[in-house]
Image: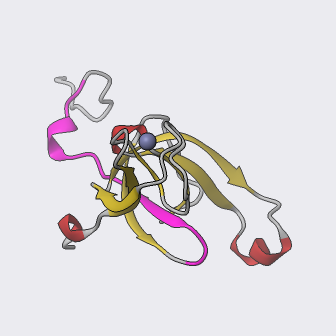
């Protein structure tokens, strides 16, 4: 998928060095005004979400859909939308991947658990000896 090339755009304050969402002219941390374009890796963690079943009229054809808050690197929080199954169970803290940004939202996809996670305690699919 070439996801290594995807970066999440942010602004970085040259006064305090902290990253924050673009669209600002003043640093939210120190009030500095020298904000430079930068980017963060696409990895994120699901912080919270809401499943919208009765949306604003312009999104009515998309319902139900998930509006989520993703926590990116350096603690940057992004309100975005979920790609894929909008009815899926979403554990808080689940890994997400930033995919793209368009005129609607920043879009995040759930990251599939890797094979290394199989066989953890609580795995119900382990075959039992008879
Ligand atoms: Zn600053």
Where does the C terminus fall, quadrant-wise? top left
Location of residue 89 in the rendering, given as x and y in whole percent from the top left corner: 53, 45
Location of residue 123 in the rendering, given as x and y in whole percent from the top left corner: 29, 29
Where does the N terminus fall, quadrant-wise? bottom left
Of 59 and 61, which appears nearest the observer? 59
Residue 112, magenta (yes or no): yes
The residue lying at 44 percent from left, 60 percent from top is 108
Q: Please state the quadrant of the image where ligand 1 appears.
A: top left
Number of numbered discs visible in the structure rendering: 0
Of 62 and 11, which appears nearest the observer? 11
State which region is magenta. 103-120
Taking 124 as reference, is 96 above or below it?
Answer: below
The residue lying at 19 percent from left, 65 percent from top is 4
The residue lying at 83 percent from left, 60 percent from top is 54
Of 101 and 93, which appears nearest the observer? 101
Q: Is residue 71 left or right of residue 42?
A: right
Location of residue 59 in the rendering, given as x and y in whole percent from the top left corner: 75, 73
Location of residue 60 in the rendering, given as x and y in whole percent from the top left corner: 79, 73
Q: Is residue 120 left or right of residue 111?
A: left
Of 7 and 66, which appears nearest the observer? 7
């Amino acid at each position: 998928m070439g996801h290594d090339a995807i970066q999440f755009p942010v602004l970085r304050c040259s006064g305090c060095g902290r990253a924050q969402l673009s669209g600002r002219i003043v640093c939210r941390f120190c009030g500095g005004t020298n904000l430079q374009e930068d980017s963060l890796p696409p990895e994120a963690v699901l912080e919270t979400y809401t499943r919208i079943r009765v949306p604003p009229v312009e999104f009515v054809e998309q319902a139900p859909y998930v509006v989520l808050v993703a926590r990116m690197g350096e603690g940057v929080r992004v309100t975005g939308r979920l790609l894929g199954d909008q009815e899926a169970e979403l554990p808080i803290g689940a890994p997400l991947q930033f995919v793209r940004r368009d005129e609607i939202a920043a879009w995040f996809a759930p990251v599939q658990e890797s094979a290394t996670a199989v066989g953890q305690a609580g795995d119900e699919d382990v075959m039992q000896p008879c």
